[in-house]
C-alpha cells in the first residue's frame, strides 16, 4: 500500500504517521484527489495554516489574491471542510427515513445561513479580486511598454552599428576604407578602341586653323601649284601657271619643262590653307606615308573624310582615290583649286560610290568595333582571308593577313566594305517591314567578335566634356527619377539570432523562426532572411584588407560564403518551407535593405498585374497624368492559332534527383544544358561556368538552359529551377522622359539574379508579318534560339583558328591542342560552304599603277552576294520561326527599354517543352544593379533594317550609339 506523502518536496521521515489527505490538501499540493491519498502531519498543517489564512481574509473582506499563494497553482479552493473519507465510510451505513428527513432539514437551514452570511462575502471578494487584477494588468502594461521601448533602443543601436559597418551615407553609396579598391566591370583594357576617348588627349596643334567657310582664291599666272602630271592615282607634281586658257583651264609648266593644260580640279594650291580647316568632303591632295614601300612625302589626291578632333589626334582622315585611307596633319594637306558640286563625281571610279554614300550619310558612320588580336574576315585581292587586328588608331585598324604566302599588313578604315561584318551587313540589309533577326542575342558581342556600331558624332564633344568637367560635374536628376533611396527597417518583433552555443545544426536551428515564403510578398527579396532570424553585416577582413559579408544564423553561427550557407540551409531545411540560397548575397556592394521610394501622389496604379504576380508592380508617373495603355496582363505564354506548342509533360524527360540537383553530373536536366556547349569548346572553356550557380546566372548560355520540370523528382528548392519561379524582384513601371514607359528596380539586384520573363502571344512569323497592328515590331521578339545557335557555327573557326602564332591560343596541354585542331578542321568545312561564295564575282581592281603604289580596294563596293545559307533552311517545313508578340497580351517584360550600356541580358530557357522553337525568354542581371535604376537590355536592332523607320536612341549612356533603329 502506498504510504507516501502527496507533497513531492516532503521532508519528513518515511516512518512518520500519514493521514488521509482531503481534497483541499490535495489541491494545495496540486495533486489529483484520490480517496487513498496520504499526507504527513507537517504537510497537512502547512496546508491548514494556508487555508485558515485565506479563510480569515475572506471573512475579513480582504482580497484573497493579496496573500502569498503556493507556487503551483491550486486548481480548486474548496471552502467546505467536509470529510469525503467520512462520506465514503458512511455510505455503507444504511440511513433511516427519519434521519434522511433530519438531514434535509439541516441542509435547508444551512443553505439559508450560507446565503445570508457567505454570499455577501463572495460578492465582496469578487469585487476585491477584480480591482486587484485590474491594477496588476495596468502594471503589466506599463512594464511591457517599458520593455518595448528598451527593445526599440537596442534595435536602433543595432541599426546604427549596422549603418556604421556599411558606412551608409544616406544617399545609398557605400564608402570604403582607403586601402581597399573594388573594381567593378573593368573596361576591357587599352586593347579596346573605346578607351581611346578616355586617355589623356593631346592639345590643339598651333598650325590648325579654326572651322569656318573655305574660300578658294583665283589662280594667277606665275602661281606655284601642284598638278596631276600622269593620272589620278599617281603623285601630283610641283609646277607653275604659265597662262590661263579659260576660267577653269590653265597651261602649266612642270619642273622638267614639260607643259600641260589642266582643269583647276587637277591643280592644287602650293601652300596649306591657313584661314580655316578643310571641311569634310573637300577635294585635297595629301602626303601619303607608307612605311612598307618607302614612298613618303608625295602628294596623292583624295577627299577629307573626317575632321581633326581630339579622338584622332587632330588629324584629318583622308580617302585617297587609290583606295587607301590615312590620317594626315593639316600642314601636309593642300586644297584642290576647284571641285564639282558633288565631290564624288571627281574621285576615281573605284571609290566613287563608296564616297558618295559615305558623304550622304556623314556624320553617321557604321564602323566595326575591334579589339586587338581579334580575327576578321577581310577581302584581299578578291579573296576573303582571315586578318588579325594588330593595332587601332581612331577610325582605322591595322590588319595583318594570315592565310596568304606573302606577308601583308595594312591600315584600313573601320567602315570599309572589305571588312566582313560591313560587307555582310550591306548584303543582308534588305529593308523589312519590322525588326527581326538577332534581336535577342548579338552573337558577335557575346563571343568577342568584331561587330558594327555607328560612330557617335558627338563623341568628340563628349570627350572634351569629360576632361573639362572633372570635379565640377553636377548631375541634375531628371524629373522621372522623383524618388529617394531609403533603408528599410526590420520590425523589432522579428526573431533575432540566439547566442551561439556549441551544437550540431539541424532543422531545429531554424524551426522556431517559422519561415513561410507566402508571407514575404511585401519584403525585399534579400531582406527575407533578416525577417526570419538572420542578421547580415559587413566587416573588414584584417588580413586581406577586404570587406566581407557575414550572416549570423538563427542559431548564432557566422557564415561568410555561399557554399557554407547552402550547406547550412540544407542541414536546417525542412520540407518546402526552407529558404533558398538566392535569398542570400555575399557581395558587400549589395544592400538588402535599400528601397527606392517615390511620393505616394505619383503612384497611378497600385498593381498593373492585378495581383497576378506574386509581387505587386505599381505604376508611377511623376511627369504628367498619363497611365499606360491597357494590356491584357498575362503570367503564362499564350499561343495564337497555327502555333502547335505542346507542353504535355509526357513529352519531356525529367531527372530522378533527390539532392536538389546539386550534383550536376547526375542530373539529366543539367546534362541537357551541358550538351550544347560541348560542340563549342573554344567558347565554353570552363565547364563549371555554364548555367546557374546558386540559382544565379553570370554568363549567357547561348545554347540554352534546360530547367527541371514537372517530370522531375526534385522538389521546389531544386537549384535548377529559377525562371519557373514566381516574380521575386520588386519592380516598378514608370514614365521616362524620352522613351515612354520603362521599368526600374526598387531594391538592389545582385549580379546574375533572375529578374523576370518576357511574355507575349506566340505567333507564327508570317502571322506577325501580315499583322499591320504589330506596327514595325516594337513589341515583337523573335524566338530566334535556333538561328542564334546556327550563327555560332557560322564563323566559329574565326574564333578558334589562329594560324599565325598558335602558341598564344593553344593551351599547353597536348590533348587540348588536338582538341582545338580538330574543331578547327571540322568548322572549316562549314566555313568553306558558307563563306567561300563571298569571294566570287569581285572585280579585280588590285593592279599596280606605278609599280610601287598598289591600288587597294579598301573602300570599293563589291557586288552584293546572297547571304550564307542557314541550317534552318534544311529543317522540317514545320520548323518555322516563331515570334513573341507582347503588344496586346504581355507581362512587365514588355516594358523594358533599350540601353547601349545594358544592365540585364536575355537567356533562352526550356522548362515546359524541349521543343527548341519555344524557349522561355528570361532577363538576368548583368551586374549588381542599385535600387532605383532603370532596367534595360540591348535590343540589338540592326540600324536601317526597317523600312521608313528611324529611331534615335535616348538611353543616355556614355557609349550610346545614337541610333536605335
Ligand atoms: C518594347 S517597347 C519598351 C516599352 C516602351 N517604352 C513603352 O512605353 O511601352 C520599345 C519601345 O520603347 C522605346 N524605347 C526603348 N528604348 C529606347 C531608347 N533607348 N531610346 C528611345 N526609345 C526607346 C521605343 O519607342 C521602342 O520602340
Image (tube, rainbow, N blue to C red):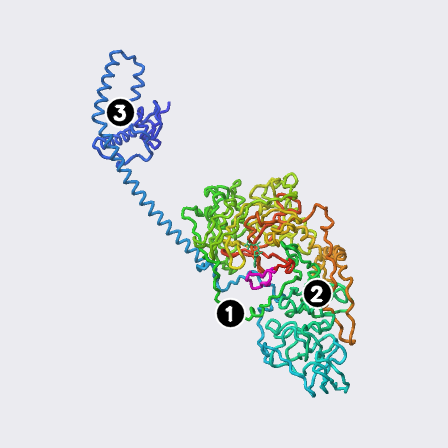
Name which residue lies at 53% across and 70% down: 465
On whether ligand 1 comes within 8 Å of the CB at mark 1, the answer is no
- Dominant SS in magenta: loop
Vertical placement of 116 versus 744: above or below? above
Q: Mark 3 points at which residue?
A: 81
Using a 10 Å C-alpha cutoff, classify the residue at mark 2 as few (fewer than 14 neighbours), some (14 to 19) or many (20 or more): many
**Horizontal and vertical percent for residue 624?**
47, 56
Pointer 3: residues within 10 angstroms few (<14), some, or many (20+)? few
Q: In which quarter of the image is the N terminus?
A: top left
What residue would you read off at disc 2? 417
The residue at which mark 1 appears reads as 470
Q: Nearer the viewer, residue 57 or 290?
A: 290
The stretch drawn in magenta includes residue 29: no
> Residue at position x 35%, y 49% from top?
149
Instruction: Give the x, y percent position of residue 115.
Output: 22, 25
Q: Could you tell me how far apart the alpha carbons at marks 3 and 1 are, in whole angstroms?
A: 97 Å
Amino acid at each position: 500500500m502506498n504510504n507516501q506523502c502527496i507533497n513531492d518536496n516532503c521532508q519528513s521521515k518515511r516512518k512518520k504517521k500519514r493521514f488521509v489527505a482531503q481534497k483541499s490538501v490535495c489541491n494545495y499540493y496540486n495533486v489529483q484527489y484520490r480517496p487513498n491519498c496520504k499526507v504527513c502531519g507537517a504537510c497537512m498543517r502547512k496546508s491548514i495554516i494556508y487555508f485558515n489564512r485565506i479563510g480569515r481574509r475572506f471573512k475579513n473582506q480582504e482580497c484573497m489574491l493579496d496573500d502569498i499563494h503556493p507556487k503551483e497553482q491550486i486548481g480548486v479552493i474548496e471552502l467546505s471542510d467536509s470529510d469525503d473519507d467520512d462520506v465514503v465510510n458512511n455510505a455503507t451505513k444504511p440511513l433511516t427515513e427519519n434521519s434522511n428527513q433530519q438531514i434535509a432539514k439541516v441542509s435547508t437551514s444551512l443553505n439559508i445561513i450560507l446565503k445570508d452570511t457567505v454570499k455577501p462575502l463572495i460578492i465582496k471578494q469578487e469585487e476585491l479580486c477584480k480591482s486587484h487584477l485590474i491594477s496588476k494588468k495596468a502594471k503589466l502594461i506599463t512594464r511591457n511598454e517599458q520593455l518595448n521601448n528598451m527593445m526599440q533602443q537596442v534595435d536602433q543601436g543595432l541599426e546604427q552599428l549596422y549603418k556604421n559597418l556599411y558606412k551608409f551615407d544616406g544617399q545609398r553609396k557605400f564608402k570604403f576604407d582607403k586601402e581597399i579598391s573594388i573594381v567593378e566591370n573593368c573596361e576591357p583594357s587599352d586593347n579596346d578602341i573605346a578607351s581611346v576617348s578616355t586617355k589623356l588627349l593631346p592639345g590643339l596643334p598651333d598650325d590648325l586653323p579654326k572651322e569656318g567657310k573655305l574660300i578658294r582664291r583665283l589662280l594667277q599666272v606665275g602661281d606655284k601649284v601642284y598638278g596631276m602630271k600622269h593620272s589620278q592615282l599617281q603623285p601630283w607634281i610641283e609646277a607653275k601657271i604659265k597662262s590661263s586658257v579659260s576660267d577653269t583651264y590653265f597651261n602649266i609648266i612642270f619642273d622638267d619643262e614639260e607643259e600641260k593644260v589642266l582643269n583647276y580640279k587637277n591643280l592644287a594650291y602650293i601652300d596649306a590653307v591657313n584661314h580655316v580647316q578643310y571641311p569634310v568632303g573637300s577635294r585635297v591632295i595629301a602626303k601619303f606615308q607608307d612605311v612598307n614601300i618607302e614612298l613618303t612625302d608625295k602628294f596623292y589626291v583624295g577627299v577629307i573624310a573626317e575632321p581633326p578632333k581630339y579622338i584622332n589626334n587632330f588629324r584629318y582622315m583622308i580617302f585617297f582615290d587609290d583606295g587607301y585611307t590615312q590620317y594626315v596633319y593639316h600642314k601636309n594637306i593642300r586644297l584642290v583649286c576647284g571641285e564639282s558640286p558633288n565631290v564624288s563625281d571627281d574621285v576615281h571610279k573605284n571609290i566613287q560610290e563608296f564616297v558618295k554614300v559615305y558623304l550622304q550619310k556623314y556624320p553617321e558612320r557604321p564602323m566595326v568595333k575591334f579589339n586587338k588580336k581579334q580575327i576578321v574576315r577581310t577581302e584581299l585581292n578578291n579573296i576573303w582571308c582571315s586578318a588579325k587586328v594588330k593595332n587601332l588608331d581612331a577610325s582605322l585598324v591595322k590588319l595583318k593577313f594570315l592565310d596568304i604566302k606573302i606577308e601583308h599588313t595594312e591600315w584600313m578604315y573601320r567602315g570599309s566594305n572589305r571588312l566582313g561584318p560591313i560587307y555582310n551587313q550591306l548584303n543582308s540589309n534588305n529593308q523589312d517591314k519590322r525588326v527581326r533577326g538577332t534581336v535577342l542575342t548579338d552573337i558577335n558581342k557575346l563571343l568577342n567578335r568584331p561587330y558594327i556600331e555607328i560612330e557617335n558624332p558627338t563623341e568628340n564633344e563628349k570627350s572634351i566634356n569629360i576632361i573639362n568637367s572633372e570635379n565640377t560635374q553636377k548631375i541634375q536628376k531628371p524629373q522621372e527619377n522623383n524618388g529617394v533611396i531609403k533603408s528599410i527597417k526590420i520590425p523589432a518583433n522579428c526573431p533575432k539570432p540566439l547566442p551561439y552555443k556549441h551544437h550540431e545544426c539541424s532543422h531545429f536551428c531554424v524551426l522556431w523562426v517559422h519561415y513561410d515564403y507566402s508571407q514575404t510578398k511585401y519584403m525585399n527579396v534579400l531582406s527575407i532572411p533578416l525577417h526570419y532570424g538572420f542578421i547580415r553585416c559587413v566587416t573588414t577582413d584584417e588580413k586581406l584588407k577586404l570587406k566581407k559579408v557575414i550572416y549570423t544564423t538563427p542559431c548564432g553561427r557566422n557564415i561568410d560564403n555561399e557554399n557554407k550557407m547552402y550547406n547550412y540551409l540544407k542541414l536546417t531545411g525542412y520540407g518546402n518551407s526552407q529558404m533558398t540560397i538566392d535569398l542570400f548575397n555575399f557581395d558587400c556592394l549589395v544592400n538588402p535593405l535599400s528601397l527606392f521610394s517615390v511620393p505616394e501622389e505619383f503612384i497611378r496604379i497600385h498593381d498593373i498585374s492585378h495581383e497576378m504576380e506574386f509581387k505587386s508592380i505599381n505604376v508611377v508617373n511623376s511627369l504628367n497624368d498619363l497611365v499606360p495603355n491597357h494590356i491584357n496582363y498575362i503570367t503564362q505564354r499564350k499561343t495564337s492559332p497555327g502555333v502547335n506548342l505542346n507542353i504535355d509533360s509526357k513529352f519531356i524527360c525529367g531527372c530522378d534527383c533527390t539532392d536538389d540537383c546539386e550534383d550536376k553530373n547526375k542530373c539529366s536536366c543539367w546534362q541537357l544544358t551541358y550538351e550544347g556547349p560541348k560542340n563549342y569548346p573554344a567558347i565554353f572553356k570552363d565547364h563549371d561556368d555554364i548555367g546557374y550557380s546558386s540559382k544565379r546566372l553570370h554568363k549567357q548560355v547561348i545554347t540554352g538552359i534546360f530547367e527541371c520540370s514537372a517530370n522531375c523528382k526534385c522538389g521546389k528548392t531544386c537549384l535548377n529551377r529559377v525562371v519557373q519561379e514566381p516574380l521575386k524582384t520588386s519592380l516598378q513601371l514608370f514614365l521616362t522622359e524620352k522613351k515612354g514607359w520603362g521599368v526600374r528596380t526598387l531594391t538592389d539586384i545582385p549580379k546574375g539574379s533572375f529578374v523576370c520573363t518576357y511574355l507575349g502571344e506566340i505567333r507564327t512569323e508570317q502571322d506577325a508579318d501580315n499583322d499591320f497592328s504589330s506596327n514595325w515590331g516594337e513589341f515583337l521578339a523573335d524566338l530566334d534560339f535556333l538561328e542564334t545557335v546556327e550563327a555560332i557555327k557560322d564563323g566559329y573557326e574565326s574564333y578558334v583558328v589562329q594560324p599565325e602564332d598558335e602558341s598564344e591560343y593553344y593551351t599547353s596541354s597536348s590533348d587540348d591542342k588536338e582538341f582545338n585542331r580538330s574543331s578547327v578542321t571540322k568548322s572549316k568545312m562549314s566555313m568553306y560552304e558558307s563563306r567561300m561564295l563571298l569571294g566570287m564575282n569581285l572585280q579585280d581592281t588590285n593592279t599596280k599603277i606605278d609599280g610601287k603604289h598598289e591600288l587597294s580596294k579598301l573602300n570599293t563596293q563589291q557586288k552584293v552576294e546572297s547571304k550564307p545559307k542557314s541550317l534552318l533552311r534544311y529543317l522540317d517545313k514545320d520548323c518555322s520561326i516563331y515570334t513573341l508578340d507582347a503588344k496586346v497580351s504581355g507581362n512587365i517584360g514588355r516594358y523594358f527599354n533599350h540601353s547601349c550600356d545594358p544592365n540585364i541580358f536575355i537567356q533562352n530557357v526550356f522548362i515546359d517543352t524541349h521543343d527548341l522553337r519555344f524557349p522561355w525568354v528570361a532577363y538576368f542581371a548583368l551586374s549588381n544593379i542599385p535600387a532605383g535604376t532603370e532596367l534595360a537590355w540591348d535590343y540589338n536592332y540592326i540600324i536601317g533594317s526597317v523600312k521608313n523607320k528611324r529611331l534615335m536612341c535616348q538611353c543616355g549612356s556614355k557609349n550610346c550609339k545614337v541610333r536605335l533603329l
